[in-house]
Amino acid sequence: MTERWTVLSVLRWTAEYLKEKGIDSPRLDAELLIGDALNKDRVGLYLCYDQPLQPQELTKIRQLVARRAKREPLQYIVGHTEFWSLPFKVAPGVLIPRGDTEILVEEALRLLEDNTTSQQPVLDVGTGSGAIAVALAHSCPDLQVEAVDLQPEALAQAQANAELNGVAERLSFRQQDMAVLSGGPYRLVVSNPPYIREDEMDGLMPEVREHEPAVALQAGSDGLDCYRLLCEQALNLLIPGGWLLVEVGAGQADDVAALMVRHGLPETFQREDYNGIVRVVGGQAPAHTDKES
Ligand SMILES: C[S@@+](CC[C@H](N)C(=O)[O-])C[C@H]1O[C@@H](n2cnc3c(N)ncnc32)[C@H](O)[C@@H]1O
C-alpha cells in the first residue's frame, strides 16, 4: 500500500483479499475494519471514499486486516459487538454473544412477564460477556440478576458491560462452578452453557475453533454435561413454579427435556429459532413442593 491509496481503493483491495482468505462476508468485514481504523461508521466511510489515506492510517488498516485474514473474529479485532440491540465490549478469552441467544432472552422475558408476583432474582449461569444478564436487566427495570462464570476474565467483561448499559446496580457477579451452584431461591435460572461434543470441536469454523475459549464451547462426549449439572441442581435453586431455561444445540432438545423431567421439572416446552431448529428448552418446578403438601 502506498500514499496513492484512497478509502475506496483500499476497501476494494481488502474485500478481495479477505474473500481469497475464505472470509464469509468480505466486503462488510472490510468496511468495518477500515471504519474502525479511521474511526468512522459505514456511512462516514462512504462519505469519504475519495479521501487519500495517510501512511499511519494504512499501517493501522494493514494490521487489522492481517488479523482478520488469520480468521480472528471481527468482533475481537474491533473490540465490540451488539446483542439485543445493546452495545457489548468483547475481547479474546470470552465468548462473543450470538444472535441465536436472543431467542433465549425473548423466552426469559415471556416467562418473567407471565409471573409478575414473584420478586426473587434471576440467576444467569455461565454469563460470559454478560449478554443475557444485561439484556434481561435492561428490559425489566425492577429485575435483580445474579450471574456466575468460571472464568474471572468473563466476569470482569460482564461487569464492564453492565456498567456500559447502565444496569450494574441491579446485577451481581461471582465466580462459581456450575457444578456447585448456590444462592437463591430464584424465579428463573437461565443459561447458555457450553454444549459442543468433543468430537465436533475439530469441525468448527477457524474463527471459533482457534480463537474462542474451549471452556465456553465444549461439554463432554455427548455435549450434555452442563445440562446434567443444571438439571440436577434446579429444584434446589428454584422457587415453586420457577423455571430453568436453557439454550440447546441442534438435536439436543429432547435429551435436555428428558433430563429436566427426570430431575423433577415435569412441565417442559421447546422453542424453535427462525430456521425451525429448537434453540431453547424450559422446565418448570412444581408449583407446590412436597414440604408444603
Ligand atoms: C456458551 S458460553 C455463554 C456465554 C454467554 N452467556 C452468552 O450467551 O454469550 C458458556 C459460558 O459458560 C462458562 N462456563 C463453562 N464451564 C463453566 C462451569 N463449570 N461453571 C461456570 N461457568 C462455566 C464459560 O466460561 C462461558 O462464559
Image (cartoon, rainbow, N blue to C red):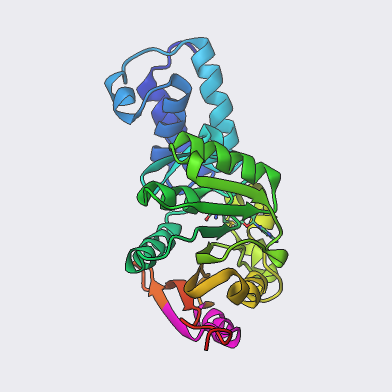
Which is nearer the eye, 164 or 34? 164
* Residue situated in front as seen by the camera: 49 or 273: 273
Position of residue 12 measured from the top left corner of the image (x, y, whole percent) = 39, 30
In the displayed structure image, the side of residue 232 where residue 135 appears, left or right: left
Q: Residue extending furthest front?
A: 292
224 is higher (above) or lower (below) than 286: above
At x 53% / y 34%, what residue is drawn? 79
User: In the picture provided, is 41 more to the left or to the right than 227?
Assistant: left
- Quarter of image, ligand 1: bottom right
Q: Nearer the viewer, residue 215 or 129?
A: 129
User: For this view, does 177 lie left or right of residue 85?
Assistant: right
- Residue segment shown in magenta: 253-269
Q: Nearer the viewer, residue 165 or 257?
A: 165
Q: Residue at x 37, y 48 (%)?
A: 141
In percent of width and height, residue 160 lies at 55, 36
Q: Is residue 93 visible?
A: no
- In the image, residue 9 lies at what x, y percent? 39, 23
Residue 85 seen in the figure: yes
Q: Is residue 263 magenta?
A: yes
Is-magenta flag for residue 119?
no
The percent position of residue 37, horizontal first and vertical second, equals 48, 23
Q: Where 196 falls versus 161 (above or below)?
A: below
| Residue at the (45%, 84%) spot, across then down | 267
The quarter holding residue 99 reads: bottom left
- The tally of labels here is 0
Position of residue 291 relative to residue 80, above or below, is below
